[in-house]
Image (cartoon, rainbow, N blue to C red):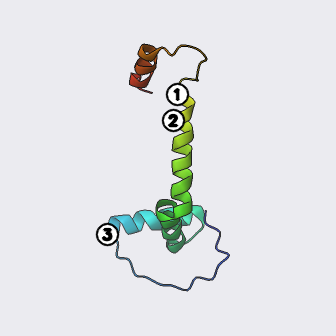
Amino acid sequence: MLMCIHMLTKRTNILFEEKTWKELTKLASKKKTSVGELVRDAVEEKYTRENMLDKRRLAAEAILLHRPKPVKGKINYKALINAGRKVY
């Protein structure tokens, strides 16, 4: 959950379909927060640069975990190609 330590100074109006509004109000009530806070959290998660960079870093780390480790000596290119073809 986003901790608001900064003053909120900008306002926007968002129109929701009735079904979406009901789901948001139920979720806000369950989490003991406001619909506005849910929307701010969602925007933070989806669009802020810091979160996008974190997701990219985690993706790169996951890729590196699955790469074959470098070996000394002769490289077995066939095995390397086959390792790249595996679906994880």
Of badges 1 and 3, nearer the viewer stands: 1
Q: Which residue is mark 3?
A: 17
Distance (Cα) linking label 1 and label 3? 46 Å
Badges 1 and 3: C-beta atoms under 8 Å apart?
no
How many residues crowd mark 1 within 10 Å: few (<14), some (14–19), many (20+)? few
The quadrant of the picture occupied by the C terminus is top left
Distance (Cα) linking label 3 and label 2? 40 Å
In the structure shown, which secondary structural element does the residue marked by tag 1 occupy? loop
How many residues crowd mark 2 within 10 Å: few (<14), some (14–19), many (20+)? few
User: Identity of the amino acid at label 3?
Assistant: Glu
In the structure shown, which secondary structural element does the residue marked by tag 2 occupy? helix
Where does the image place residue 84, in percent across and percent down from the top left?
42, 25
Q: Is residue 54 above or below residue 5?
A: above
User: Identity of the amino acid at label 2?
Assistant: Ile
The quadrant of the picture occupied by the N terminus is bottom right
Where does the image place residue 66, in percent across and percent down from the top left?
53, 28
- Residue 67 is marked as 1
Where does the image place residue 34, in percent across and percent down from the top left?
54, 72
Q: Residue at x 51, y 57 (%)?
A: 52
Q: Residue at x 54, y 55 (%)?
A: 53
Badges 1 and 2: C-beta atoms under 8 Å apart?
yes
- Quarter assignment of residue 87: top left
Given residues 31 and 64, the one toward you in this image is 64
Q: Residue at x 59, y 18 (%)?
A: 71
Q: Is residue 41 above or below residue 80?
A: below
User: Identity of the amino acid at label 1?
Assistant: Arg
Given residues 52 and 8, the one toward you in this image is 52
Q: Which residue is mark 2?
A: 63
